[in-house]
């Protein structure tokens, strides 16, 4: 019979519904049972695309003897870390303190008061390779619980107190924000940079998109070829490596080797959103078409394979298919020739490193050891013909690959990750002039704002199969607010700003620290846990405080709300110690700090976006790399002072602005009349405005000046 997890919606929890372990989801029933029976809790946290989570399930949680130990002596709780990042944050810190490392699956033992006292990550079922067996761990923990209760409860109490101190996560340094924070971060990144393969550190190698954004911002602030070359080399090596899916587009989570060849094959929505945005900025800065191609292929992968019929975006594709990691993605020369024929097949195998011996367990991961231009030069092939042939070959191979058994998919929709993807799509729509990306961003935003909310307007965290659940966390609000601002700048529908302002006011009301600066990860009415944390450090996604500080400054500049910019600055000043001592954990905070250091340009365009002249001026602006700017545009009849005569179009009836709510931009447009030629462009910074310029030629000249 299925266990209690059969009633859950999380694909990860449902994967465990037939285990012989008497699993509980996190909730009152399990916590009450532990207290009533005075049993320790075994808390297992993972996620659906986690390869080693699958391994531990098959080895241990399907083992009748291990299940019997768990069922007799423990209350076993299974948690999807993507549904409950609040629990994951707290208990991952505990495991790191106990063992010096962390990861998933996370295995942690708690008292009935939820205080951790022992933990680890993956355990084999029986002892091997110097690792204790999970059966030994369970036996030892149960014996200690019976015979050493006083020591366990004392250790758990002291560890919990330490976690409560860590929960504030800030290291105030007493310094104010200054550009030196950025330059210290750049120096640290240069020290860890791999000058041969790009990226930072050794294997395993992660993309670090926020760090690449920091380098670009530092380069823009103080141009230096070496900084841009670090970004360029990393972007080039990743797009050539096996971490990139050369057939469908999109990136795997990380590379197990130093040179980006062998990926950990799971594909996460957040990685592809963040990397699409970085490659888009790479295109803005360098004009290299290959970066635009990667953006297009990555976003098209998401639209084709990761988009729900309701409009939101799914979370992950698994590393495994048919029980084997990477099986879906690898090829042999015979398979290639069978699809492409001998001549084109041989050429494709040469270009994409497909060989008889293979580069991954006897088969081949597609990658580009040499660029197409280098291949053409070495083999005396015509480059344009080679590019056409390879594009055709990739499409034919993709059609065949799509008939294979696909990796498992986690099709739940998370607000925070969807916010990241909406932001990337809305940016790409303007830069690449692709209306389908704008429509996908709009559709996803409408879905979140109407289907993933409580009746009182508060956000929920996730949605699957028609059911929205779990109160939202700070990163849900921060990522969606930021995305709505980007979406407004892309289509000029002011109702997106209305929605962003409503969500911002909810954050200020429920997440702000009333006794200090910064914002808690959970709301003031969230389920009570052993600590309430402030999320300041980046993980694989931007920190929620860093993302919120970014969004607050953007909305504050557009709406003239100094309370928002002040809250952002206080958050950043709280984290100056973190930015100074551990800059590689503070990429999003450094991005927000760069914005706070300014100048933050407020660009107001008075012109009809339905007219070609204004439309081209806006399109040209979107293509420029201007990292610290906000954009607003109104037709002349709606922009004369605060006399807005044309209401903004509504997102849809359920999110229509209340009366007067579309006046958010009135302060920005106050005193900015239309000019003799459309559009009129006003640029303000630090409470003062430049003289306006009129017409497309003058506007383009201003964009060029700002870009330099």
Image: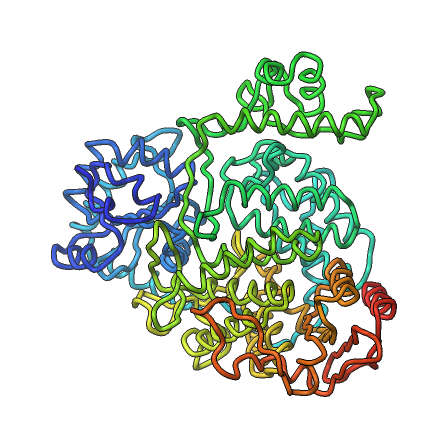
Residue sitting nearer the eye, 232 or 442 = 442
**Quadrant including the C terminus:** bottom right
Question: What residue is rendered at 39% in x and 42% in y?
Answer: 48
Residue 16 position, x and y percent, is: 28, 40
Check the image and tell me how it is coloured: rainbow
Describe residue 140's horizontal placement relative to residue 410 as left or right.
left
Quarter-wise, where is residue 585 in the image? bottom right
Residue sitting nearer the eye, 686 or 163 = 686
Whether residue 261 is situated above or below residue 165 in the rendered picture: above
Residue 62 position, x and y percent, is: 25, 33
Residue sitting nearer the eye, 420 or 622 = 622
Quarter-wise, where is residue 422 in the image? bottom right
**Quadrant including the N terminus:** top left
Residue 455 position, x and y percent, is: 34, 70
Question: What residue is rendered at 77% in x and 59% in y?
Answer: 219
Q: Residue furthest left?
A: 37
Q: Is residue 42 visible?
A: yes
Whether residue 360 is situated above or below residue 234 in the rendered picture: above
Whether residue 620 is situated above or below residue 373 in the rendered picture: below
Describe residue 68's horizontal placement relative to residue 155 as left or right.
left
Residue sitting nearer the eye, 455 or 705 = 455
Residue 355 position, x and y percent, is: 63, 17
């Amino acid at each position: 019979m299925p266990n209690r997890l059969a009633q859950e919606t999380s694909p990860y929890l449902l994967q465990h519904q037939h285990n012989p372990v008497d699993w509980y989801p996190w909730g009152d029933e399990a916590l009450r049972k532990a207290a009533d029976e005075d049993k320790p809790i075994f808390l297992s946290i993972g996620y659906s695309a986690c390869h080693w989570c699958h391994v531990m399930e098959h080895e241990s949680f399907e083992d009748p003897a291990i299940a019997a130990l768990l069922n007799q002596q423990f209350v076993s709780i299974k948690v999807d870390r993507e549904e409950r990042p609040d629990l994951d944050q707290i208990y991952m810190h505990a495991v790191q303190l106990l063992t010096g490392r962390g990861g998933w699956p996370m295995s942690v033992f708690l008292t009935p008061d939820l205080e951790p006292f022992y933990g680890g990550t993956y355990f084999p079922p029986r002892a091997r390779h110097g690792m204790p067996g999970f059966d030994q761990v369970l036996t030892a923990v149960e014996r200690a619980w019976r015979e050493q209760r006083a020591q366990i409860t004392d250790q758990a109490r002291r560890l919990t107190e330490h976690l409560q101190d860590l929960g504030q996560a800030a290291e105030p340094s007493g310094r104010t924000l200054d550009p030196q924070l950025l330059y210290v971060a750049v120096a640290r990144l240069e020290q860890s940079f791999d000058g041969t393969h790009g990226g930072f550190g050794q294997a395993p190698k992660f993309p670090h998109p926020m760090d690449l954004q920091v380098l670009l911002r530092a380069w823009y602030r103080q141009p230096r070829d070496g900084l841009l070359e670090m970004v360029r080399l990393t972007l080039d090596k990743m797009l050539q490596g096996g971490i990139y899916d050369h057939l469908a587009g999109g990136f795997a989570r990380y590379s197990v080797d130093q040179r980006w060849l062998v990926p950990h094959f799971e594909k996460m929505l957040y990685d592809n959103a963040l990397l699409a945005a970085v490659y888009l900025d790479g295109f803005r800065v360098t004009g290299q078409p290959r970066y635009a191609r990667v953006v297009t292929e990555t976003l098209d992968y998401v639209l084709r394979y990761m988009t729900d019929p309701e409009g939101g975006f799914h979370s992950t594709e698994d590393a495994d298919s048919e029980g084997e990691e990477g099986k879906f993605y690898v090829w042999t020369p015979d398979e290639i020739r069978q699809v492409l024929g001998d001549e084109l097949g041989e050429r494709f195998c040469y270009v994409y490193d497909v060989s008889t011996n293979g580069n991954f367990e006897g088969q081949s991961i597609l990658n580009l050891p040499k660029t197409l231009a280098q291949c053409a030069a070495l083999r005396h092939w015509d480059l344009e013909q080679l590019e056409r042939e390879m594009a055709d070959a990739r499409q034919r191979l993709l059609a065949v690959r799509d008939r294979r058994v696909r990796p498992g998919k986690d099709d739940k929709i998370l607000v925070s990750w969807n916010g990241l993807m909406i932001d990337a799509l809305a940016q790409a729509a303007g830069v690449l002039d692709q209306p389908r990306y704008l429509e996908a961003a709009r559709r996803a935003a409408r879905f979140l704002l109407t289907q993933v909310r409580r009746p009182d307007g508060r956000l929920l965290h996730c949605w699957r199969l028609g059911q929205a659940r779990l109160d939202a966390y700070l990163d849900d609000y921060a990522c969606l607010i930021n995305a709505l601002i980007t979406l407004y700048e892309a289509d000029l529908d002011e109702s997106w700003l209305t929605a962003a302002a409503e969500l911002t006011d909810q954050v200020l009301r429920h997440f702000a620290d009333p006794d200090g600066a910064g914002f808690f990860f959970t709301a003031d009415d969230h389920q009570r846990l052993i600590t309430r944390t402030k999320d300041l450090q980046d993980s694989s996604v931007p920190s929620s405080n860093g993302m919120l500080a970014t969004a607050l400054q953007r909305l504050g500049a557009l709406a003239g709300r100094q309370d928002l910019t002040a809250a952002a600055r206080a958050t950043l000043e709280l984290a100056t110690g973190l930015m100074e001592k551990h800059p590689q954990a503070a990429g999003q905070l450094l991005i927000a700090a760069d914005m706070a250091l300014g100048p933050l340009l407020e660009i107001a365009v008075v012109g009809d976006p339905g007219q070609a002249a204004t439309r081209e001026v806006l399109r040209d602006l979107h293509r420029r790399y201007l990292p610290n700017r906000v954009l607003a545009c109104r037709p002349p009849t709606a922009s004369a002072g605060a006399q807005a005569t044309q209401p903004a179009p509504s997102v849809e009836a359920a999110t229509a602005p209340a009366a007067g709510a579309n006046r958010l931009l009135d302060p920005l447009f106050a005193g900015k009349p239309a000019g003799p030629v459309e559009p009129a462009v006003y640029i303000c910074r630090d409470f003062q405005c430049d003289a306006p310029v009129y017409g497309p030629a003058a506007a383009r000249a201003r964009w060029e000046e700002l870009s330099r």
